[in-house]
């Protein structure tokens, strides 16, 4: 079927290629005319020179997929909406906040325009593996778009079926899922990313414990401000992290795709010398915690993983200074400078 | 080669079957004579009626694998050691504390007896998939035992190779790894389990946030002790957790073997009605945190996942009562009883 | 000066008494006519039979203090505002969300009405000790109300001056403070409560560790699901918590008013038998964490204390069941029932 | 009564002065002869030139108080013990690990020597305020030393009595307490410090949230790696932390001695420019968490406060680099460098 794609970054462009290769007709637009021209060379892809041009090239009801940064979705919707007609469909495949979906869908519904929110996971690997999609909106509209989703999704591939799962009960095994009314897609994706933060931190913390298991070889001189290690003989190990992550990929309980990637990263750079340790967070982790707080559901692991990222960027510095100041006040303790 | 197995529980018995099926000669012993008799029916398996009988049936240097609860390893080693001779090998394949390995290896070394600590992961799935093994001890002795480890391990199977990994650099791709001197095997397994706790908690917390996303439909009456939900319209979702865990298995960033198992559990029992929520912890999680503290390495995620288990068993009750008591003291607040 | 008080619960009534006793003229209103009649017996207090009656009894510019639950502030402001005139002053002394203050102040400013947000701390002790107040709004208006704040506040009392603090630099030493534009008062109070949660939890956790220090006397039987205590001889203490909290009040670094209250609670009920351990949270703790997340400031301690409260009310049950379900899936582990 | 003091650092010297001023006879020793000579100028203080000289100057049964770093207690006890006789008393007033107390007391008991462990709190303020003491050992011996403890302790001073507390029930109101058999004193002090860490972190985190409440004035440019702040207008406050901590000292629920010190630190240096933010931890915090883990008691707040200190010293760097590496692997995300 026909689909318009607005935003031809890595993910948008890859989706178009996947769709075109499988016989769908794509009309594409991007701020960069060169990017549009490039992609329009593919079979089944038509370029558009402007948003108006794009809309004019679409059969009704139009289906327009936005694959753009969350920060510009609002203005883009406002620019497109006046040109749309009742029955047309806007799909937000980016990382929007589900609360914005709810407001946006309501506003568009007043004009008869359908809105579908799609959370996609798969990162740079999506072109090859397909994108896992979590979808919110009107059930009928999502079913109308089914050919699109089925093509973008990974399909069952070689992944084992879940034991006990009945056959023929929907699309989850193909890698896409209707999750509920508007916002449900991005809510599910938001929580997905919250879990991702937690898993990543679990690996990172565990590997850091292995890395420091040689600390008994570097016992510090006694100073009044530092606890001496009681049993240096218990911390004499030099663990080989690339090998350990590799062996864990093989039959252990913690095997996962993230572990695969970690093993890849460690084989390439065992000391992590290419990274400074400033870890970004991109919204979903924060929103997950806010939702958990509204619900009154404790999420200590997901929250700790978010805060590790904040701290990694230096955001606990003022609090740390206050702690040193208090220690000085009650105990006369001076800070011990970093060892060079 | 020949191996003695002491302890024929689920894991020990499965290992013997895997070994015997692949041409190794196994001599087996267990507290239960019936269990020994049962397993001795397999080709290549010889039963022993006592520890002395077992030792007498072994060629020198003897290799004896203990697959018994951590709590009885000490006494078993003490019972066997006097019967062993220099060059014999004791292998502890259970969940011992690596600190005990260090002491035990030192004590046995004085008698010329070799000690090897093996952390194994794979749970009830090991017979089918093979066991992932992390091994500590003398390098030469571990190499001597290589035929045993290679057989118990999963082998490379159909798992993709790690991109960029040179070929022929050791055994990790076969699912077993020499990790370092004594204790290194159980240290690595300990951290593995610490990570496991963290990952499990990440999934559990995220799914709990999804589960409670319908809380806006059940807005409580205003009472002075409870915060009213500001935006009930943001929490109107009824998420289908079996379907969501299924779709995440398909191309998402958080795909893992633990997620596969979670999807299996949810398909069978979406409301988790078979469980009361008292979560055990079996040592490695605690030891991981103690090691992290000795090393001065922050592990907030792994620790939070351990504490969730403590709390699940009611261990925060006294602290919680104290909080209510303080609230009563300063604000005259009374506890709000549970809604029935 | 003249002040109207709307809402004569514990705090509102106490404030009126404190004001009237010190020569201010109070006009009071409450949903309960009996409460109004009761308080109107005090010298200097005039009762009002309705909001209209109240407003009619006030000299211009009117000053009306709302001391009502956060959940009904919005509707009360909407009911009063139409009767007010430019220059009149509305004061919200309750526990409103500072974000609501910002919106409310803006709306009232359009009608020329001044809005002041006041966070008050002191609980049931305020009548005797005075209330600590954190104030947001227009600086000129807050100065106009200074006689009211000075009377409600505790004053310097017998509390030592902060060493190094210049004299005569504002009102903080009297126990009230202009914190900034609208919302600043409730923002400061919100964080105050966030800190309160953290401190309460610090005491509760520490005391729980002392309480359980006799666990070595009750060593459980070995079962595969539970880690045996390695060194029971290290946990043979029967600590007397009422005495320990008392001694900490005397010269220790952790002396505080909350500790005073904890000692009071423990002397009365050392086993905390009057409490079930369901700990409420009343908004500010949640809002503090949401602000921290918006700011990107890590607050692991404050967040952990909030989550302890969530868990105390059973809100981690579903997550805990999931953990047990996963353990069953990979290891065949069954839950260990509670000991009776 | 007579007491020997070994170790004349800040705390040891201050205790001697407090004792001598109140009529006790002190014999003192320190590695530094100059320090001994200095203190021996005080009335009632006799200097010793060596450990042997010290022991020779004491009446039997001797009472010797060690006020030395935890790291040298073991060797000091080993040096003194051979010179002592049955009935003599060794008191460890430093920050020893209670587990060492248990072993040490057992060893000394075999020679008939009494051992008393005393946790002291009060820091540099002890000379003026007196030291809060938590005491472990034989009850009879602790009662024998009562005159010493009573003098070093703060006494009831002007602190209000705990409501409901019976009169004449022990020494807690004087600021010292017999807590139980050996180790009980240092166990109680250990938990005291664990709580201290938690309280300090609660203040530090809350003040950091206030400090960053102006973040809406510095809204970053949109980049794909950073979540834009949704509502900058909610974060426009410039809070005056010296004034806010001052007002909280006056009738608020979070008033405490630590808050007094924080207010002092902030008046002197509102930007905390004298501190780099590397926060030491000195043993008790770590041991508290290890005890909690052994007991199975969740202590998320105390643990988070310990980990904040680890992180403040850069100990999460490797884990953070791993997180960035994973993000690069799955999403091609590059680290965003620090803004200059």
Image: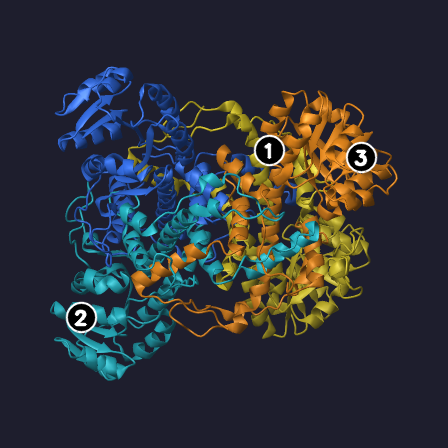
Chain colours: A yellow, B orange, C cyan, D blue
- SS at mark 2? helix
User: In terms of depth relative to the viewer, which is nearer, B128 or B104?
Assistant: B104
Along the polypeptide, which appears first: circle 1 or circle 3? 3
Across and down, in percent, residue C54 comes to 22, 80
Quarter of the figure with residue A164 = bottom right
Quarter of the figure with residue C279 = bottom left
Identify the residue at horizontal 55%, vertical 28% (top origin): A234
Q: Depth-wise, is mark 1 or mark 3 nearer the camera?
A: 3
Identify the residue at horizontal 82%, vertical 45% (top origin): B38
3 and 2 marks on the same chain: no
Q: What residue would you read off at disc 3? A: B27
Q: What residue would you read off at disc 2? A: C17
Check whether the beta carbons of the residues at disc 1 and disc 3 lie within 8 A of each other: no
Question: From mark 3 to mark 2, how far is it between C-alphas?
Answer: 88 Å
Q: Residues within 10 Å of mark 2 (few under 14, many from 20)?
A: many
On screen, A139 above or below B316? below
Quarter of the figure with residue C323 = bottom right
Q: In what quadrant of the picture does the C terminus of chain A appear?
A: top left
Across and down, in percent, residue A35 comes to 69, 48
Across and down, in percent, residue B190 comes to 61, 38
Q: What residue would you read off at disc 1? A: B98
Question: From mark 1 to mark 2, how far is it between C-alphas?
Answer: 67 Å
């Amino acid at each position: 079927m026909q689909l318009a794609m607005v935003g031809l970054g890595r993910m948008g462009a890859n989706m178009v290629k996947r769709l075109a290769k499988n016989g769908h007709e794509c009309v594409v637009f991007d701020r960069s005319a060169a990017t549009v021209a490039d992609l329009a060379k593919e079979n089944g892809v038509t370029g558009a020179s402007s948003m108006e041009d794009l809309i004019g090239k679409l059969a009704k009801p139009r289906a327009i997929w936005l694959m753009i940064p969350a920060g510009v979705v609002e203005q883009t919707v406002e620019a497109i909406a006046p040109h749309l007609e009742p029955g047309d469909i806007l799909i937000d495949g980016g990382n929007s906040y589900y609360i914005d979906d709810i407001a946006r869908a309501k506003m568009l519904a007043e004009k008869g325009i359908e809105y579908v929110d799609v959370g996609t996971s798969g990162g740079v690997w999506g072109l090859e593996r397909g994108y896992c999609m979590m979808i919110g909106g009107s059930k009928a509209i999502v079913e109308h778009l089914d050919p699109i989703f089925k093509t973008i999704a990974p399909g069952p591939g070689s992944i084992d079926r879940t034991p006990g799962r009945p056959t023929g009960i929907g699309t989850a095994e193909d890698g896409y899922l209707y999750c509920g009314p508007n916002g449900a897609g991005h809510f599910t994706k938001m929580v997905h990313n919250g879990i991702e933060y937690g898993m990543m931190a679990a690996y990172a913390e565990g590997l850091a414990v292995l890395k420091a298991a040689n600390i008994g070889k570097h016992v510090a001189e006694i100073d009044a401000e530092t606890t001496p290690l009681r049993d240096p003989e218990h911390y004499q190990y030099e663990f080989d992290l690339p090998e350990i992550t590799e062996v864990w990929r093989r039959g252990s309980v913690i095997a996962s795709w993230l572990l695969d990637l970690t093993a890849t990263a460690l084989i390439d750079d065992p000391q992590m010398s290419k990274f400074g340790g400033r870890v970004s967070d991109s919204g979903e982790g924060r929103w997950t915690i806010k939702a958990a707080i509204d619900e009154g559901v404790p999420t200590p692991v997901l929250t700790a993983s978010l805060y590790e990222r904040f701290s990694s960027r230096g955001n606990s510095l003022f609090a740390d200074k206050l702690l040193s100041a208090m220690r000085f006040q009650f105990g006369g303790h001076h800070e011990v400078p970093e060892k060079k």
